Image: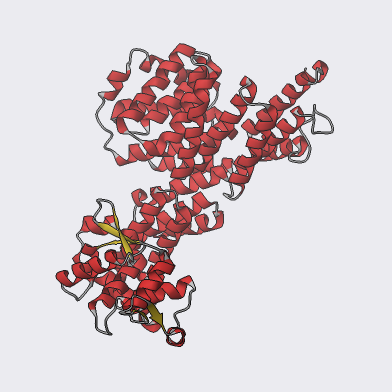
Amino acid sequence: FFFVELIRSLFDERFLVLGEDGKWTWNESEILGQNKALGSAEVSDAIVQGVIRGEYDPMKEILQIASCLGAEFSIHHINLAASSSPNMITRAVEVLLFRKIILPRSDTGKYRWAHDRFQNSAFKLIPQDECSQFRYMIGRKLIDNFSQDELIEHAFLVSGLFYGGEVLLQTMKEREQIAELYSIAGGKAAHSGAFEEAAEYFRKGINLLPPDHWQQDSLYSISHQLYNCLAEMECCLGNTSEVDQLCTKILENSRSLQDQMRAYDTQIYSLSYRNEMNEAVRLGLDVLGKLGEPVPRRVGTFINIRELITTRRMLKRLTWEDVLRLRPLRKWKKAAALQTINLVFAAVLRCQPQYALFLTAKGLKITLRDGLSPLSALLFGFFAMILLNPVGAIDEGIRCEEIGYRIFERFQAYDLRSRILMIRYAYAKPWTDSMDKCLPPLLTGASSGLLTGDVEFAFINSYAYSIDALLSGFVPLKIHLENMTNLKKQYAALGQETVMFYLHSAVQLARNLLGMARDVRVLSGEDFDAQDSLKTCLVTNNAAGREFILLSQLFLAIFASDYAQAV
């Protein structure tokens, strides 16, 4: 391709001439003198230069602008940014198409560079010391001419034009405007699972704000948005110290409890996944008290039996149709309470299970009394888990889970998908369906959790898949060990201490079953030491972790036919 374009360029510039006798002639020294080297970068430079007919040719401006708009661009955007007339721009695009420097993008009305070297060559047309100013000019014109919907649609494009050129933003109004643009772009990046890129957008937005931004009424909202979003991204990335610093800053500067709630949510989630579960539960209970939903510091057997009886009686005659007819939940404190219960529930199950039933019953009462929300789906699911095990009310639990799933479908609450699929296919459906039907949705739940940043439940789905596949015999032991080892590598970079505890123990269990341990009856070896981990579980009050170790030891003892050890 580049060779053909080089010959075309040499012909256009009359370095290569067809004589009257039908023979081609050329002057090698002139060609070399014009730096017509055969390297592809030099060739692309020569081709791009070949379509420009002078310093003030509109083609030069159009190439410069298009190079800043990215790998693909539209004539509409060039029209907004260029000083040339629309007719000139249209003719220039036709020339670029003819010379195969750009190509059309099917029926989208957009164009793309035929090769990224053409884009690089066009970008070189901008003097290096004027690059930031030129990109700033394009971004400024696009902002001034875009509607709000267009600005949201093209947030990546426009915000990228200001990257590295923030020093050119002179007024506070302009800096605030670009900070909001970075917030939009960061939100879109987060939605697609690009958490590091999203964090960088939010960080750049914060850096544009003045030191007293929290005190300025006009900047309070954008400050709140950027700090909360950055804290959530750092949480997804496992950067716990940054999460703590950002949440502390938000809580100190928020003007109301409602404004503080998002930071509390992030703190609870962060504490839970870093294995500080008691702290997560303590904070969750404190927040519920602030919201007017106090929880007794001691919940004993009598209270739990009472809540179980009253809640089962309350739900006994309800169908999913009845629940879906409930009015929407409007009270923000009630909605915030449901979110707090949702976030703290996993930590409660692991370290203070005596609160699980009480909190679930409280959430269901809020739903039936104050209205339906997407989070109601989880409350029905949590109660179904309790009914299925330990209560053993199988039919009742399956019916309750089905109500929760119908609520999930009604609201299309895809941000909760990882949690909903875990409840449905790790707890409920195995009672009625074969395991081969339950396993694939658990993988979907894991992928969904990683995409939305719900790493904790992404892992629970992955872990449930691996254990259920192993115990059901659908996955051979060697493949199971490989799967768990890959999961350990995947989650290691995310700073998930709780997750890594279970992954290390699961890998060691697989090694023992394969005979890759000194004593197959003892869950200790290269990846895990049961005795040390049991001590850690006692210190952190990790009841679920302790039970998993003991059950694994029981399983290994039976596997080794050491029934005395099993007893």
Figure quadrant of the C terminus: top right
Q: Quadrant of residue 410?
A: top left
Q: Look at the image and tell me whether residue 229 can be seen.
A: yes
Side of 378 where 272 appears, left or right: right
Farthest residue, direction front? 21
Q: Look at the image and tell me whether residue 310 can be seen.
A: no
Side of 111 where 43 appears, left or right: right
In the image, residue 179 above or below residue 26: above
Across the whole image, how many numbered discs are drawn on residues? Answer: 0
Q: Residue at x 23, y 56 (%)?
A: 109
Residue 430: x and y in percent read 52, 18
Q: Residue at x 72, y 22 (%)?
A: 555
Q: Nearer the viewer, residue 551 or 150?
A: 150
Residue 123: x and y in percent read 37, 74
Q: Residue at x 39, y 48 (%)?
A: 191
Farthest residue, direction right? 518
Figure quadrant of the N terminus: bottom left
